[in-house]
Image: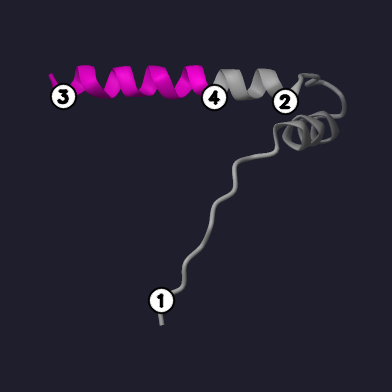
Amino acid sequence: MEQRRTVRPPNWGELAYRLLMDTGGAVQIKGEMLRKWLLVAEAERDTDSSNDQA
């Protein structure tokens, strides 16, 4: 029997709060900024991957 898993997008606010708690307050950032950083990192990774194939 095939079992499918669904992946839900991260809750950026929750992730920001967990970072705050896990680092004892050393990392204070808003969830929206985390999302923007991820988008930039993915874009750079895609650019690097396409340059490696050339």
- Mark 3: secondary structure: helix
The residue tagged 2 is 31
Mark 2: amino acid: Gly
**Extreme left residue here?**
54
Amino acid at pointer 4: Leu
Helix, strand or loop for the magenta stretch, by majority:
helix
Mark 2 and mark 3 lie on one chain; the one further toward the N terminus is 2
The 10 Å Cα crowd at callout 3, few under 14, some 14 to 19, many 20 or more, is few
1 or 3: tag closer to the N-terminus: 1
- The residues tagged by marks 1 and 2 sit, at their Cα atoms, a distance apart of 35 Å
Badge count: 4
Give the mark nearer the N terminus: 1 vs 2. 1
Query: Contact (CB < 8 A) between labels 2 and 3?
Result: no
Q: Is residue 50 magenta?
A: yes
**For the residues marked 4 and 3, what is the alpha-carbon distance in whole angstroms?**
23 Å
x%, y% of residue 17?
A: 81, 32
Indicate whether 37 appears above or below 12.
above
Q: CA distance from mark 1 to mark 4?
A: 31 Å
Q: CA distance from mark 4 to mark 2?
A: 11 Å
Q: Tell me the distance, in whole angstroms, between the alpha carbons under discs 2 and 3.
A: 33 Å
State the image coordinates of residue 21 (x, y, percent, origin top left). 85, 34
Helix, strand or loop at mark 2: helix
Q: Which mark is residue 2?
A: 1
The residues colored magenta run 39-54
**CA separation in Å, label 1 and label 3:** 35 Å
Q: Looking at the figure, which quarter contains the N terminus?
A: bottom left
